[in-house]
Image (cartoon, rainbow, N blue to C red):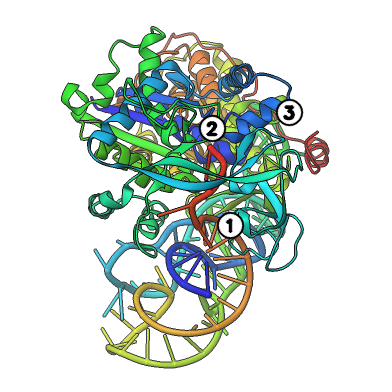
Amino acid sequence: MKRILITSAIPYINGIKHLGNLVGSQLPADLFARYHRARGNEVLFLCATDEHGTPAELAAAKAGKPVADYCAEMHAVQAKIAEGFSLSFDHFGRSSSQQNKELTQHFAGRLAEQNLISEVDEQQVYSHTDGRFLPDRYIEGTCPNCNYDKARGDQCENCTKQLDPIDLINPRSAVSGSTDLEVRNTRHLYLKQSSLRDTLNAWISEKTDWPILTTSIAKKWLNDGDGLQDRGITRDLDWGVPVRKGGAAWPGMEDKVFYVWFDAPIEYIACAREWVDAGKGTDWERWWRTDKGADDVSYYQFMGKDNVPFHTLSFPATILGSGEPWKLVDYIKSFNYLNYDGGQFSTSQGRGIFMDQALEILAPDYWRWWLLSHAPETSDSEFTWIKFQADVNKDLSDVLGNFVSRVTKFCRSKFGETVPAGGNYGPREKTLIADLQIRVQSYQTHMEAVDVRKSAAELRAIWALGNEYLQAAEPWAVFKTDPDSAAAIVRISLNLIALYGQLSAPFIPDAASTMRAAMGRPDLQWPNTVETALDRCEAGDAFTVPENLFSKITDEQREEWSVRFSGIRS
RNA sequence: GGGCCCGUAGCUCAGCUGGUUAGAGCAGUCCGCUCAUAACGGAUUGGUCGCAGGUUCGAGUCCUGCCGGGCCUACCA
């Protein structure tokens, strides 16, 4: 039995995520977790909300709530939606947890002991009206290069020139519009990533089986310009993990917090501790400390490409730099973006379909299947309502749903709602079993390689084999002259439904559960061989005819939804 | 500006270290079946593999240049 640790990039607390976010991290992570659990492996699947930082503070202020309350509410909302998508986290934690505070401070202390922290004096813009320091991009003004009047302090969106806030003409706060700004001196901690460059470079270089997307982004950062730069890990904010050196005060850092990207990945570890403290587990170090049992753990991370630098460099620098035996990631699966009807999904612009809206119109399996079977693995992919309707109707309703329907209803009408006795499996069944065996093997191989689209294609092919078999065997014709032979055909077909109910579970857990329940086999084990798997529903066993697994998306629905989601989310 | 990724049938995509007539699903066309959500099965149409050079006995696959699309570029997270 293998031990698999899985983390999904933790979604930011600031609002409900869209389907592009979902397909890039949580959904494929869930697929992988469900698969390995089904194979009987020991899985710990963790996710959390990423709660610190300026956007959370501003969103809370806009909602007129204390930031802690706002985050608590949004965490509950995101947890509920995750449940709606059947995301099977062992624990859905919070980066603002006490466990994460302690661990983040611990890591900072360790890094300081290892001489990997430097203190740097720098200048930041302070807004008197807002009563806070402002990150570069929260300062707006006129671009000195192109005169665009809504240039941001980090970059001008109009001419794409990189800027420094002090370059802006007539700078103002993007929060309040105030021009009462002041450049202040402030001291911050930097993680000396540059001194770990060779170590990280060697580590990345040995990861030849990682997605090109992952390693190319990492190598770019390692080798670009002067190589990997040190990174500031503190901010002048109120909301965050207070800067401390382990359990001790950090002189000069009294009013500062750690940067979200420092504490957010540490939440992967802290989340395991939350999991134990919540009474769901007993030993978190067994998953995270290689000196305490985690040496045989395989650790997989899932994320969108925008998260790659932090997971390939910053977080490993934190882990390695600590000098303690923490578990390092073994495989980083990264995804491109999913676009929406010719443009990008956008949280800030409210463009596209958001997770709560998706669940309002269709059951999660529809979304899970389409998103996973079109996961943006090699390049950005695109959601359109036309394709979504066509693909979902064909794959789920016609190929799979109709198979279940035709088999169970035929049996009910000819033999009743029990698995019929009589006849034997002949050459055609042997061929079916052999074909299935090859495809199931291939499905497992793709799944273990985290090849999401290929896994989906293979699963679909496995479903299609059922229809091919049935068409060739023609039990409806055979029944007229040889009911026993027809019974054998139906018996193996009913077993196929149970098998599909098992193989399909990682992709479409609800429908899979319905299939297994209908065959009276809710708790099947993953098949060692297809041959033995197709003898599990035995003559005389009762089954039920389930409701149609998937109803089709009509043209009317498609048109209504494409209009409803064409504009800006209200 | 620099770097990376992608560009293969109408659409979505496979094609590992270069090797017989370039594959799959969808859509289209034809045939078959009638158990089933008018679903299913079989067959079939369709590509000068972005363009131009080059290496090679041989290139979708390697090299160079160009065109088009996307992403990243370190204080949003």
Amino acid bearing label 1: Asp
Q: Residue A10 location, x and y as percent? A: 49, 32
Residue A461 can be seen in this image: no
- Residue in the image at 33% along x and 32% along y: A108
Closer-to-camera residue (B36/A339): A339
Q: Which residue is mark 3?
A: A62
Marks 1 and 2, the one that precedes in the sequence = 2
Q: Which residue is mark 1?
A: A164
Amino acid bearing label 3: Lys
Element at label 1? loop
Closer-to-camera residue (A389/A130): A130
Amino acid bearing label 2: Pro
Could you tell me how far apart the alpha carbons at marks 2 and 3 are, in whole angstroms? 20 Å
Quarter that holds the N terminus of chain A: top left
Tag 3, which chain? A
Element at label 2? loop
Q: Nearer the viewer, mark 1 or mark 3?
A: 1
Q: Which residue is mark 2?
A: A11
